[in-house]
Amino acid sequence: MELGITSALEPPADYSIDVRRDVCPMTFVRCRLMLDRMASGQVLEVLFFGNEPARNLPRTAIEQGHSVLSQEDGRLLLRKG
């Protein structure tokens, strides 16, 4: 288990964003713009495609102070820090 990733039951997402048609770094740019509009503690569901976003989105989110609640094939759940 990676640092910052929890395996608790998933809370419902407050917001959802689909970045499956985007490529890095735009995947996180769009996520960050959404996170900037959210209140601390709210949950963002991110739908993505590919190995690069699967690696980079959670790592960058953790570096920015957010928590990864879950990650599965093409879906990431973040809690804004």
Image (cartoon, grey):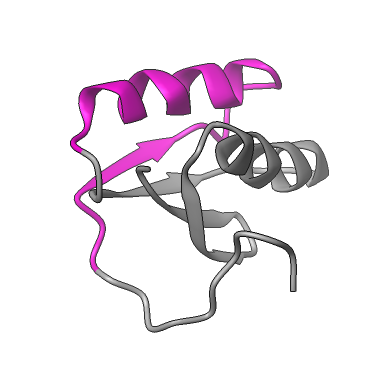
Q: Where is residue 2 in the image (x, y as percent from the top left)?
A: 74, 65
**Residue 11 higher or lower than 64, as above or below:** below
Q: In which quarter of the image is the N terminus?
A: bottom right
Q: Position of residue 57 (x, y in %)?
A: 64, 39
Identify the residue shown where x is 63% and y is 35%: 63
As for residue 37 lying within the magenta part, the answer is: yes
**Residue 8 higher or lower than 60, as above or below:** below
**Residue 17 higher or lower than 69, as above or below:** above
As for residue 57 lying within the magenta part, the answer is: no
Q: Which image quarter: residue 59? A: top right
Q: Where is residue 72 in the image (x, y as percent from the top left)?
A: 61, 67
Q: Is residue 12 found left or right of 21 in the rendered image?
A: left
Identify the residue shown where x is 37% and y is 43%: 81
Q: How many numbered tags mark residues here? A: 0
Identify the residue shown where x is 18% and y is 36%: 39
Q: Is residue 48 found left or right of 12 in the rendered image?
A: right
Q: Where is residue 41 in the image (x, y as percent from the top left)?
A: 25, 50
Residue range highlighted in magenta: 12-39
Identify the residue shown where x is 60% and y is 16%: 26
